[in-house]
Amino acid sequence: MEHGRVTHTIEPVYDDRSRVLVLGTMPSPASRNVGFFYGHPQNRFWRVMERLFALPDHALVDNDVRISFLLEHHIALWDVLASCSIEGASDSSIADPVPNDLTHILDAAPISHVFTTGGAAAKLCRRFDGNLLRERGIEHVALPSTSGANARMRLNDLVLAYSALAERIDMRQAKRAVRRAVLARRDAMDAADRAARSHELCRGLVSVLEHLPARATVSVYAAMNSEVDLDECIRAAFAHDLVVAFPCMQRTDNGRQDMVMRAVSQADYLARAVPFIDRPVASFMPSPEDEGRFALVDPRDIDLMIVPLVAFDDQGHRLGYGGGNYDAYLPQLDSDCIVLGAAFETQRVDRVPVEERDRTLARICCA
């Protein structure tokens, strides 16, 4: 296929409320045919947007609907190049590129971040627009290509990468998108693999338990769904004569549900006779007998806390299930308390969407 000179003919999408600008390189032949960006049926850009913003599958198939979506979510969309010589849709074949003038959009909208889709778009943006973005204090973030040719990245992988864009629009929505994507990965683990990795992780946790003094207090959790199963670690804690506490949700006087920790005996644990373990997200209304049987644990008395999580990154950022229970509880711990996150390797992401109130973990144990 010979190089042909291509001129950009698709108008940019933006208005005076746009906060982020997404740039590709140049519309592909398929996009030029349909008259809109990312028009090839195998390009996953619009599917990623559907997942990020919790839209039904195939909700963004019509160009007018796509434009409405972009404007509603304050996303501007265009390409780096105004013209170039290119072979088909191959970015690697681009020659003699001429850039678009981004100042039209940057003057009209409060753009804080520019996101490029694919390596070529990132390289060309840095070449032609790097100085302009730096002068205006606009951050450039390079994202992977959503092209079907980028076969090494599955849809969930792209959703996780593009959550950086969603963060700038709606932090809660970005967290939900990462949560859904990582839970899908965790749920897809083979049962035997999950059990083997739980065993490996528990072996590491038991080595921590062995350094605690007798009657030290350990906060654990009972695995829900596809979480790391701590049963082996919990049994070891009892064997080492440690006080073992589990999270318990309780209603406060103002009607709010708060997480506390209550001690559980080995006999009750093995008999599966603990209401707040069987129903961990339900409010537990303790009777006078329960108050003695499942003693309330002072956060300052906890020597080791093992924290469940949905996703984590290399900076120690943790994404939970969205209730903020551990974020509220962790500051109550004594400074000497050892806090460990527990997760499978598949729950690791490049970056977790974080807010100021979110707590980082100094150590996350994974397998």
Image (cartoon, helix red, strand yellow):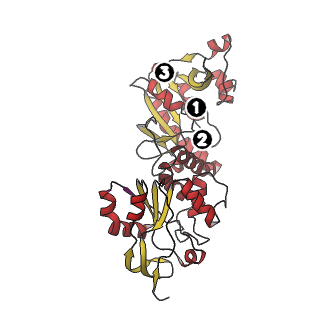
What's the residue type where badge 3 is placed? Answer: Pro
Instruction: Find out whether the residues at labels 1 and 2 contact each other: C-beta distance under 8 Å.
Output: yes
What main secondary structure does the magenta stretch of the protein show?
Answer: loop
Lateral position of residue 260 relative to residue 140, left or right: right
Q: Position of residue 267 (x, y in %)?
A: 65, 21
* Residue 142 belongs to magenta span: yes
What's the residue type where badge 2 is placed? Answer: Glu
* Residue 113 belongs to magenta span: no
Callout 3 crowding tier (Cα within 10 Å): few <14, some 14–19, many ≥20? some
Identify the residue at horizontal 30%, vertical 63% (top origin): 131
**In which image quadrant can residue 263 be found?**
top right
SS of the residue at dot 3? Answer: helix
SS of the residue at dot 2? Answer: loop
Residue nearer the viewer, 259 or 95: 95
- The magenta stretch is 136-148
- Which residue does the numbered mark 1 point to in the structure image? 221
Q: Is residue 318 visible?
A: yes
**In which image quadrant can residue 251 be found?**
top right
Q: Which mark is residue 299?
A: 3
Callout 1 crowding tier (Cα within 10 Å): few <14, some 14–19, many ≥20? many
Q: Position of residue 154 (x, y in %)?
A: 56, 61
Identify the residue at horizontal 42%, vertical 75% (top origin): 82
Callout 2 crowding tier (Cα within 10 Å): few <14, some 14–19, many ≥20? many
Q: Which mark is residue 227?
A: 2
